[in-house]
Image (tube, rainbow, N blue to C red):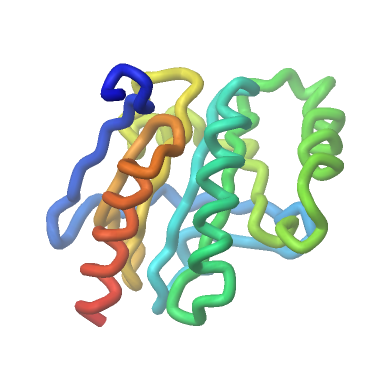
């Protein structure tokens, strides 16, 4: 049973974890977003993907996060496909494909990221190309928790525990 479970890695950040690099973009619904500012005063869950193959893991995480926190007023969440390394010539097609594959009711949670890939990889401690990278920011934009890997019940339970503890501190 243990061999069949997904591999994941997680860590608690310190009380005043590093600040997320500022990123600016537009959701797939067309709304301008500046992060972490768009999450000010709320707990933010950010799901990063850096490769085409990370689409599966990021989608699985996003689905579960939306089910639990999609309507929670104290939480915001975004899925952030990082596309800076995609050749400019085909970026529009890639974004269009992501948009077409994303249900309309979730498009406001998707922000394609076209800049600062190197900084974001450092921020999430990038080391596995096709993983989903989930970070939790406190209401001040500080990193409080992170995990990466495929979605699994065990990994989600750890994320849920971290979120519960963080939300109780408010």
Q: Is residue 32 left or right of residue 23?
A: right
Comparing 6 with 46, the one in front is 6
Q: Is residue 161 above or below residue 146?
A: below
Q: Looking at the rendering, in which quadrant would you find the N terminus?
A: top left
Picture coordinates of residue 47, whole percent (x, y): 49, 45
Q: Is residue 19 above or below residue 105?
A: above
Picture coordinates of residue 49, whole percent (x, y): 54, 33
Q: Is residue 89 left or right of residue 59?
A: right
Residue 161 figure quarter:
bottom left
Which residue lies at the image location 41% right of the left edge and 34% below the top edge? Answer: 119
Which residue lies at the image location 61% right of the left edge and 38% below the top edge? Answer: 81
Picture coordinates of residue 48, whole percent (x, y): 50, 40
Q: Is residue 94 above or below residue 129?
A: below
Residue most toward the front? 1
Comparing 160 with 14, the one in front is 160
Q: Looking at the rendering, in which quadrant would you find the C terminus?
A: bottom left
Residue 29 figure quarter:
bottom right
Which residue lies at the image location 37% right of the left edge and 21% below the top edge? Answer: 4
Picture coordinates of residue 10, whole percent (x, y): 25, 39
Question: How many numbered marks are there?
Answer: 0
Q: Is residue 21 above or below residue 54?
A: below
């Amino acid at each position: 049973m243990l061999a069949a479970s997904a591999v994941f890695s997680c860590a608690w950040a310190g009380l005043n974890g590093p600040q997320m690099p500022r990123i600016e973009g537009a959701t797939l619904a067309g709304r301008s977003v500046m992060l972490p500012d768009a999450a000010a005063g709320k707990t933010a869950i950010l799901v990063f993907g850096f490769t085409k193959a990370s689409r599966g893991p990021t989608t699985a995480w996003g689905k579960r996060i939306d089910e639990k926190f999609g309507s929670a007023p104290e939480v915001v969440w975004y899925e952030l496909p990082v596309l800076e390394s995609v050749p400019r010539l085909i970026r529009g097609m890639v974004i269009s494909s992501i948009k077409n594959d994303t249900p309309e009711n979730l498009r406001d949670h998707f922000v394609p990221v076209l800049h600062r890939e190197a900084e974001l990889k450092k921020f999430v401690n990038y080391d596995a190309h096709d993983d989903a990278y989930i970070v939790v920011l406190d209401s001040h934009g500080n990193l409080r928790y992170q995990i990466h890997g495929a979605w699994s019940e065990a990994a989600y339970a750890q994320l849920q525990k971290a979120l519960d503890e963080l939300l109780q501190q408010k």
